Image: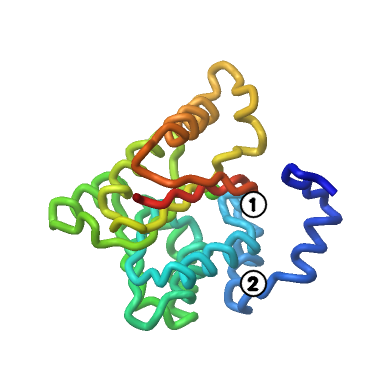
Amino acid sequence: MSNQTINVTDEIYRYILDVSLREPPILAELRRRTAAHPRMTMQISPEQGQFMALLVRLSGARRCLEIGVFTGYSSLAVALALPDDGRVVACDVSEEYTRMARDFWSRAGVEDKIQLHLAPALETLDDLLAQGQAGAFDFAFIDADKGNYLAYYERSLELLRPGGLIAVDNTLWSGRLVAPAAGDADSIALDAFNRQLHGDERVDLSLVPIGDGLTLVRKR
Ligand code: CA
C-alpha cells in the first residue's frame, strides 16, 4: 500500500493493459503502423488514448482542438468518442506525418469530424480567435513543440468555454524535469510551463502521471 502514486513497473504496466485496455482494432492497427516510424515515441500510449476518450465522453465535449497530430492516434481516439455532430480542429505542420492520420481517419469513418489545418498552430488558433470562436470549444489537447506550450495554452484557454478541459501531454518528460540539464531547451520550457500553470488562478489543475505525464486543466 502506498499513499503516493505507484511506480508503474513493466509488469504492472502489462497488467494495466491486460485488465483494462479496450483499444478499437483501427487504433491498434494505427499503433502497429506507427511503431515502424522513426519518431514513434511521439505517439501517445493506448491507455492514455482510452483515458482521453473517457474524458471527452465524460465532459460531453462536441468541439475539440488538437495541437500536434503526428500520425493521428489521439485525434482518432477523440473523434471516435465524439457524438455524430462532434468536430475536431486538428493542427499540424507536417503533410508527411499526417498522411497516415488522414488515411486512418477515413478508414474509421470519422474524416468528416476532423478538420486538418496544415499550418503553424499559432496561426490557426489566432485565425479561430479572429473569427470570433473564443469560448466555442469544449476540449483541447496540446502535444506539439514544447517551446510554444505556453502560447498554445493561452490561446486554447481563450478558445475554451468556462468548464472546458485542456489536456497537455509530456508534462513529466521522462522524469527529466526533476533536474533539467543546462541547455536542454525542451525540459526548461516544460518546467517553466508546469510552474506557470501551478499558480494560474484561472484554472483547476491536475498533473496525471499517465503516459509521459498528462496535465488536465479545467477553465474556471
Ligand atoms: Ca506527446
- Whether the residue under disc 1 has CB within 8 Å of ligand 1: no
Where on the picture, by quarter, is residue 162? bottom left
Residue 210's tag is 1
Determine the CA span between mark 2 and mark 1. 19 Å
Q: Which residue is mark 2?
A: 28
| Nearest to the observer: residue 146 or residue 18 | 18
Compared to residue 2, the image places residue 91 above or below, namely: below
Q: Residue at 62%, 49% (x, y): give it.
A: 41
Tell which residue pokes out farthest to the left in this image: 131
SS assignment at label 1:
loop
Q: Amino acid at mark 2?
A: Ala
**Residue 143 place in picture, x, y as percent:** 47, 49
**Residue 121 place in picture, x, y as percent:** 31, 48
| Nearest to the observer: residue 176 or residue 58 | 58
The answer to whether the residues at label 2 and label 1 have Cβ atoms under 8 Å apart is no
Q: Residue at 32%, 49% (x, y): give it.
A: 156
Q: Residue at 47%, 34% (x, y): give it.
A: 198
Could you tell whether 32 is left or right of 11 in the image?
Answer: left
Q: Amino acid at mark 1?
A: Ile
